[in-house]
Image (cartoon, rainbow, N blue to C red):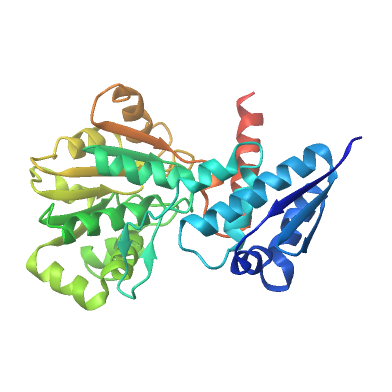
Amino acid sequence: MTFLERTIGIERIENIIALFGSFDENIKMVENEFSVRITNRDSQIKISGEEENVIKAERTIEGLIALLNSGGQNQLTEQNVRYCISLADEDAQLKLSQLAGDCICITAKGKPVKPKTLGQKDYCHAIKNNTITFGVGPAGTGKTYLAVAMAVTAFRAKQVNRIILTRPAVEAGEKLGFLPGDLQSKVDPYLRPLYDALFDMLGAETYQRYVERGNIEVAPLAYMRGRTLDDSFIILDEAQNTTNEQMKMFLTRLGFNSKMVITGDITQIDLPTGVRSGLKNVLNILKNINDIAQIRFSEKDVVRHKLVQDIIKAYEKIEEVRQK
């Protein structure tokens, strides 16, 4: 066992305050994860412990400093710290410096929307530079929210005239027929996450105004049949619940000067037994076509509560055992 001590100099006092966090909670997370001791004296961070653990803790601290220096952040969240810890086996500082200044959109409340992980940055870059982008990965990775942010940005810049958001109305254990109201009332619960994201970006009043003008449309996937969608930013959410026929129908709606983003999680398929997911199939069919990008998210990209990451890992382990 080799004992090691490393020192990191920090020029800005506000970075030291942000790095340690309230009641040193950020540094305690790093100490507990790597079994090291971290102290601060005279603008220097000292890390001591076993050699391998000290090196990983050092990379994590440098990654957090890079995050503070690059994104205009003045504080760190638990998610920031855990993400840097997850990159400890890599060059976290170099990777996280790549997140610098990427503001995609400003919400109705003036909050900037930025990629929080490298997977999210790659996703936004792919949407910007490709006509069709597939975003595939677990819940909580920001697939839908970031796609809506990119759509609002394109709409505000007058790159498109319409935003169209759609989902397959597949029953996840519950029956549509038991819900009260007309057809629109029955499908609205399925479209609620899309409404929520649009309300966040635009505000409820602005959203309603654009809907009345026909600039924004939120509808079940079945409503897309027979249409050609020009000058539009189209998002298909929960695409794992499409059939092969539905996926082909949707993709062939693409018109001139339009973009498509298809999001889904192939571990959460609610289709009847024996029905193959259109998303799983299309990822193989279209994998080598130019101007079509496929971005795969992992549990590292989850930006919800830490337990969401743990739940995803637990399910993945069970699935691996089942397949073996």
Instruction: Decide if residue 118 is on the left or right side of residue 134.
Output: right
Q: Measuring 35% from the left and 24% from the top, which residue is drawn there? A: 284
Q: Say how many tags the image has.
A: 0
**Res. 12 visible in picture:** yes
Q: Quadrant location of residue 89?
A: top right
- Observer-nearest of 284 and 51: 51
Looking at this rendering, what residue extends furthest in the right direction? 1
Tell me residue 254's x, y (percent). 14, 39
**Res. 309 visible in picture:** no
Quarter of the figure with the N terminus: top right
Vertical arrangement, residue 1 with respect to residue 314, above or below: above
Vertical arrangement, residue 72 with respect to residue 30, above or below: below
Tell me residue 52's x, y (percent). 79, 37
- Observer-nearest of 156 and 233: 156
Q: Measuring 61% from the left and 36% from the top, which residue is drawn there? A: 90
Looking at this rendering, what residue extends furthest in the bottom direction? 205
Instruction: Decide if residue 95 is on the left or right side of residue 207.
Output: right
Vertical arrangement, residue 264 with respect to residue 32, above or below: above
Tell me residue 122's x, y (percent). 39, 41
Quarter of the figure with the C terminus: top right
Q: Measuring 13% from the left and 56% from the top, which residue is drawn there? A: 162
- Observer-nearest of 149 and 271: 149
Tell me residue 48's x, y (percent). 83, 49
Q: Measuring 60% from the left and 26% from the top, which residue is drawn there? A: 323
Instruction: Decide if residue 3 is on the left or right side of residue 9.
Output: right
